[in-house]
Image (spheres, grey):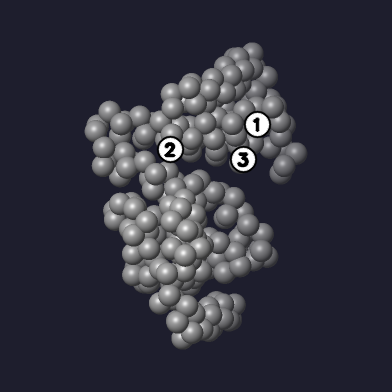
Amino acid sequence: AEFAAAMACISIFVKVIMGTGVGLKLPILIEEYSRGNLVMGYIYTALASAVLGMGLPTVAAYIVVAVLAVPALTQMGAHPLQAHFFVLYFSILSGLTPPVALAALAGAKVADADYIKPSWASLQYGLVAFIIPFLFAFNPALMALAPAWDILWATIATLMGCIAIASFMQGHFLKTTNIAERLLMGASAFGFFAFVVTLKFWILLAAVICLGVVSVRQGALARLGWGPQADEGHSVEGG
């Protein structure tokens, strides 16, 4: 019943968008409101992808958004391959974004939990997936559109950024992190992702230092035998 109600509401919403012509005017609206700024164009496209992709299968969501939004991005200077992958990612992620989040709705039914909590939890766990499209939108190396050396740097930095942001969001690395370690992991994630976009090596160095501080400290505590007991006690309290 909940699925049927959700799909009915989504169907009405999509038909209103297409019936009023807003969907067909989407490229013009994106270009007008972004005023030629490619960053804002990507942000508006991400929002449009989340809305137009609601409740649709992956292929259908991608086709709908690609036909309407990609022309606006390419007119503002985006590479067609980057624009299409950006739209593909966000049209798929429409299944995680509240208030619809059909993937979270299915998870809530399996876990017999309230719908709102799994939807926000899915958004939290999938946060990195909302960042990755912006990285390959501004760094062609992640799309293999650059020399091999640049591709290697971008790939490693992105991977390390994903690890760091996962640690920041979950509060755990080699062991449970304290507030200072968690902030350092957040700063490290920001640095790695910023390096992918800017290619400034001093930013990469700062990110590596932040990650290294946390790694060395937690590794030392684990060797002293403090880490496992703390984690075990934390898990017992959480259970």
Amino acid identity at mark 2: Val
- Please give the label number shown on residue 183: 1
Rendered location of residue 56, percent (x, y) = 43, 72
In the image, taking residue 110 as reference, residue 91 lies left or right, namely: left
Quadrant in which residue 185 is drawn: top right
Rendered location of residue 104, percent (x, y) = 56, 63
Task: Give the structural element (helix, strand or loop) at label 1.
Answer: helix
Q: Which residue is mark 2?
A: 197
Q: Which numbered disc, 2 or 3, marks the residue closer to the eye?
A: 2
Q: Which numbered disc, 3 or 1, marks the residue closer to the eye?
A: 1
The furthest residue to the bottom: 19
At horizontal 29% and vertical 56% (from top left) the residue drawn is: 80
- Please give the label number shown on residue 170: 3
69 is higher (above) or lower (below) than 135: below
Task: Give the structural element (helix, strand or loop) at label 3.
Answer: helix
In the image, taking residue 125 as reference, residue 76 lies left or right, namely: left
Mark 2 → mark 3, Cα distance in angstroms: 25 Å
At horizontal 64% and vertical 66% (from top left) the residue drawn is: 115
Is residue 94 in sight in this rendering? Answer: no
Quadrant in which residue 159 is drawn: top left
* Sequence-earlier tag: 2 or 1: 1
Q: Which numbered disc, 2 or 1, marks the residue closer to the eye?
A: 2
Task: Give the structural element (helix, strand or loop) at label 2.
Answer: helix
> Looking at this view, is 97 or 45 the one in front?
45
- Please give the label number shown on residue 21: none
In the image, taking residue 28 as reference, residue 227 lies left or right, namely: right
> Looking at this view, is 174 or 63 the one in front?
63
* Sequence-earlier tag: 3 or 1: 3
Amino acid identity at mark 1: Leu
114 is higher (above) or lower (below) than 37: below
